[in-house]
Image (cartoon, rainbow, N blue to C red):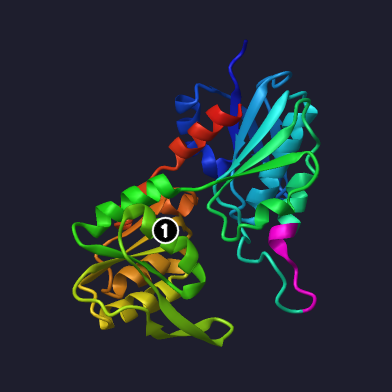
């Protein structure tokens, strides 16, 4: 029996190499080029007929989303027995519901897009990581089976590393309190929270901290860091409440538009750590970001679901 094949979008080639080595998958070849008008040419070079195929990629941009969709469609059209999409970063996951009349629920429309992939001979699945909303897997329809993985094993290791001997686990807001409390219980440490109110479309202010601190290190966990504004406000509140030090851990290190530099420049953090679910994290490793691979999580999933 031939081993499974793995392909990837351009951004996720490092992850594909780790998955190939850890899950004993054969690396498939893709031919790529660009036409003068900006249109993309893609060709699956390796024969996929009757093979179990893994395709790694993330919806980091509209172009990346379409590359993942085009490759998935082509793999199925050429006879793959099964198709497993590995999607560590599912973009628009905070747009999982409409808060105003007429808003696009983009998490749902992206799920519908991937649900429209033609079914492979024995079925398709999509494996996702630490989604912002537990309801997102239910947006996938038809023949595409969603699998939601949690990065707790990697996150717990990072939190312990950054927290040291005396730490508590913090949240950027009460909205993530349930998840942070669960993680704190697993770690056997107290959980603390900040409460905030919105002052405008892109501005919030902290109104209170749930606990008086007495010199402990607060390790703030958030599922994603994009601009860093909420993280900086929370760190400042914890310091004012008595924290001896503050560190931050995230699953999805997006760090858009110089966010890591702003966070580090605030002088509030002893360390910042992320998984490599988003390709920006590895790019920022040389700037002091602590990065851990999520490949082992997906390797374990592939072994369970193959």
Q: Tell me residue 61's x, y (percent).
A: 62, 56
Neighbourhood count class around disc 1 (C-alpha, 10 Å): few under 14, some 14–19, many 20 upward: many
Magenta segment: does it hold 226?
A: no
Q: Main secondary structure of the magenta part?
A: loop
Vertical position of residue 282 compared to residue 52: above or below: below
Residue 46, image quadrant: top right
Give the residues in magenta: 101-108
Q: Is residue 248 visible?
A: yes
Q: Residue 48 falls in which quadrant of the image?
A: top right
User: What residue do we see at 57% from left, 41% from top?
Assistant: 10
Residue depicted at 32% across the width and 78% down the height: 211
Residue furthest out toward the top: 1
Rendered position, 54 above or below 272: above
Percent position (x, y) of residue 187? 33, 54
Corner quadrant of residue 232: bottom left
In this view of the protein, which residue sits in the foreground, 237 or 14?
237
* Residue 236 horizontal/vertical position (percent): 32, 79
Mark 1, residue position: 250
Image coordinates for residue 281, horizontal then vertical, percent: 42, 53
SS state under label 1? strand
Q: Residue at x 29, y 65 (%)?
A: 168
């Amino acid at each position: 029996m031939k081993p499974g094949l793995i392909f990837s979008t351009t951004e996720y080639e490092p992850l594909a190499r780790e998955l190939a080595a850890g899950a004993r998958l054969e690396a498939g070849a893709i031919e790529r080029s660009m036409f003068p008008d900006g249109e993309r040419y893609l060709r699956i070079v390796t024969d996929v007929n009757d093979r179990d195929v893994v395709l790694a990629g993330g919806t980091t941009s509209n172009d990346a989303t379409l590359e993942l969709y085009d490759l998935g469609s082509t793999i199925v059209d050429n006879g793959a027995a099964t198709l497993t999409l590995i999607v560590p970063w599912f973009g628009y996951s905070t747009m999982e519901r409409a808060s105003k009349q007429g808003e696009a629920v983009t998490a749902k429309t992206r799920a519908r897009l991937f649900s429209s992939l033609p079914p492979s001979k024995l079925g398709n699945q999509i494996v996702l990581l630490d989604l912002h909303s537990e309801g997102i897997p239910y947006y996938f329809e038809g023949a595409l089976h969603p699998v939601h993985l949690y990065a707790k094993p990697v996150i717990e290791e990072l939190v312990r590393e950054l927290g040291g001997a005396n730490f508590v686990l913090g949240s950027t807001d009460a909205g993530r309190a349930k998840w942070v409390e669960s993680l704190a219980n697993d770690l056997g440490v107290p959980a603390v929270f900040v409460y905030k109110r919105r002052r405008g479309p892109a501005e919030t202010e902290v109104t209170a901290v749930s606990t008086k601190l007495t010199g402990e290190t607060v390790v703030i966990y958030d599922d994603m860091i994009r601009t860093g504004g909420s993280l900086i406000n929370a760190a400042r509140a914890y310091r004012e409440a008595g924290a001896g030090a503050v560190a931050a851990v995230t699953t999805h290190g997006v760090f858009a538009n110089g966010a890591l530099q702003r966070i580090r420049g605030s002088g509030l953090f002893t360390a910042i750590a992320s998984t490599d679910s988003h390709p920006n994290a590895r790019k920022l490793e040389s700037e002091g970001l602590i990065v851990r691979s999520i490949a082992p999580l997906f390797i374990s999933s592939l072994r369970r679901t193959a």
